[in-house]
Image: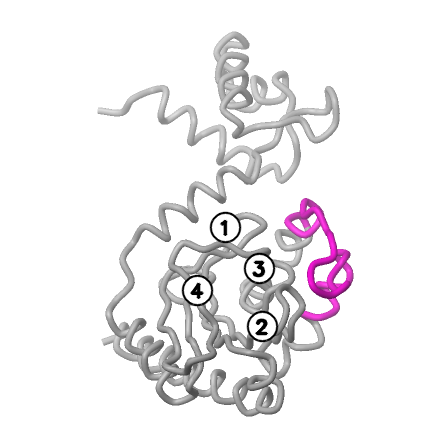
Amino acid sequence: MLVKQITNLFSLMELFIQSQRPLSVREIVSELGWPRSSVFNIVSTLVELGYLYQPVARGGYFPTYKWMELARDLSEAQPLPDTVHQLLEDLADETGETAFLAAGEGSNIVFLDVVESAAEIRFIANIGQRLPIHITAAGRAILSQMPEQERGGLLKRIRYQPYEKETFLSPESVEEDIASNSIKGWYSNLGNYAPGVAGVAVAFPFMNRRNAIALGGPVSRIEDKLESLGSLLTKRVGEFLKQHNRKSKR
């Protein structure tokens, strides 16, 4: 037995996917053949809940990014296998720096797992901690996994401001960094956000999620070995993903 209100909602969302543009109430009525009152009530409810908006006044309705945030939150709720935490432990042991797993959350990244360095002077991070997505190495590694249109939309919504350094103050500057580092596959942050704190990160597309794995530490220690750490991260994460994908196909 199907619940009509639920099937109508998914029919409406499929119509937006097919149309790829904002739709007026009249167009939705014409395409789906529903009573105008029903369409008006559904659209009004979704607007009130923040799931539809009008990109241009009286120019039709279109889904907001809240749908993507909902899907991402559900995806992030799925538990990660212990092997991911083991990878972080191995990286922390091998490099002597703090290793962490991050995911995107709107215009921020959120730390999902952290293994701190044993060094007295180290990068300290807490699970659940949030940092700006565009200025952090992990954030740009996550942004690099997005389709260009989606990434562009997100970058336009960011409120740019100088942090420790006056870097990454526009969508264009972030896009330029992603493009210039996409070939080598790793991204860096040398004190751009916080004084004396550096990071290097790689994309970690895992279980249909856009994650990043990164190493963090003092600039004085990271800067001189930035290339070697970036290469090491790329190699170790690549090996992990290859092995995981091979096991998944069995």
Q: Amino acid at mark 1?
A: Glu
Q: Amino acid at mark 3?
A: Met
Q: Residues within 10 Å of mark 4 (few under 14, many from 20)?
A: some
Image location of residue 54, percent across then percent down: 67, 26
Question: Total marks drawn?
Answer: 4
- Image marks 2 and 3: residues in contact by CB distance under 8 Å: no
Dot 4 or dot 2: first in sequence order is 4
Q: Which residue is mark 4?
A: 125
- Image marks 4 and 2: residues in contact by CB distance under 8 Å: no
Q: Quadrant of residue 56?
A: top right
Q: Which residues are magenta?
A: 153-178
Q: Which residue is mark 3?
A: 146
Q: Which residue is mark 2?
A: 197
Q: Amino acid at mark 4?
A: Ala
Identify which residue, 212 or 148, lies in the foreground: 212
Question: Left of 207 or right of it: where is 64?
Answer: right
Identify which residue, 145 or 215, lies in the foreground: 215
